[in-house]
Amino acid sequence: MAGLLITQCGVKRSITDPGPKVVSDVAPHRLGIEGYSDQCVVFDTINSVLITKAEALFTSNDELYKTLVTIYSIRDSFIYISAVNNGFEILRAAVNKDSIMVIDRVNMIVYSSLVKKKLGYQNPVNFNDLQNLISRYYLCDEIEYAREIDFTQVGFLFNEPQIKKSIIMNRETLLMDRFEFVHSETKKYFLGERSNEGFKIYSNFMVNEFEVIAKGGTITYNQSIDVKMEMNRKKYSFVNF
């Protein structure tokens, strides 16, 4: 079996290729939680999700970038994001169970944080929260949190002390309508909602306050890619958030 090599600041680890690709998505025959449960049975073999060539308008610090985004996730292990503008990568990020790293290539800054902090207030999202936003099939492990909200929506509620957490899906299509992760004390947030323009995401907890409107992209399951989180440490500033 082929191996995946992930490089994070010089630290390398090998990930086993999970196997053959899942060819296509399947529309639910039943609605709501019952339809979602049916899909979870069919897609129980998904070990990784790769999203390529998603179009996104990225706004931060009054700067607007039209980007192509790649998102790669290994189930319960690793998340990688890259945004490219006119052939130049403006942002690269990696998240695992322990840490978050964001490389801002425009301003030459590396932001990092522990996922679960030892002291002080926690981040509004953890690894599982971010993973669940990449694909609804990751939410199959969280089905005990699912609730039928009304005749139009299904909700997953993960509220914690001081942090409101929810993912809301359309009851018929099972597409994500919105998500909310908000810390009541720090006022840090990670929010998203579907609109006519695409899916809008906005946050103030990682780099700076930013907004992304994303649409399109090609999804491949159980695919391996090479990922590198390297930078010239002499040229970058480092910020812990």
Image: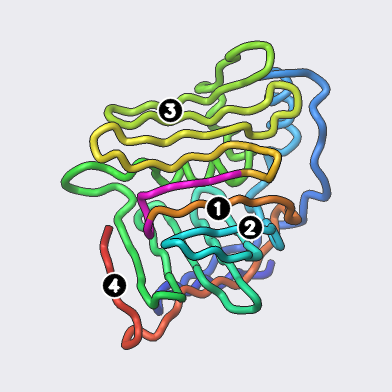
Query: Looking at the image, is mark 4 or mark 1 nearer the viewer?
Result: 1
Question: Marks 3 and 1, how far apart in space?
Answer: 24 Å
Residue 240 placement (x, y as % from top left)? 26, 62
In the image, the segment drawn in magenta is: 200-208
Question: Marks 4 and 3, how far apart in space?
Answer: 32 Å
Q: Do labels 2 and 1 touch, CB within 8 Å?
A: yes
Residue located farthest toward the left when viewing the structure as drawn: 119
Query: Looking at the image, is mark 4 or mark 3 nearer the viewer?
Result: 4
Query: Looking at the image, is mark 3 or mark 1 nearer the viewer?
Result: 1
Residue 169, located in which quarter of the rendered image?
top right
Please report the residue visible at 38 percent of the width from the left and 29 percent of the height from the top.
Answer: 164
Q: Nearer the viewer, residue 21 or 114?
A: 114
Residue 204 magenta-highlighted: yes
Q: Earlier in the sequence, mark 2 or mark 4?
A: 2
- Name the amino acid, label 1: Val
User: What numbered label is drawn on residue 158?
Assistant: 3
Q: Earlier in the sequence, mark 3 or mark 1?
A: 3
Residue 176 placement (x, y as % from top left)? 63, 34
Q: Residues within 10 Å of mark 3 (few under 14, many from 20)?
A: some
Please report the residue visible at 64 percent of the width from the left and 51 percent of the height from the top.
Answer: 214
Q: Which residue is mark 2?
A: 56
* For residue 91, side relative to residue 98 (left or right): right
Q: In the picture, which quadrant includes the N terminus?
A: bottom right
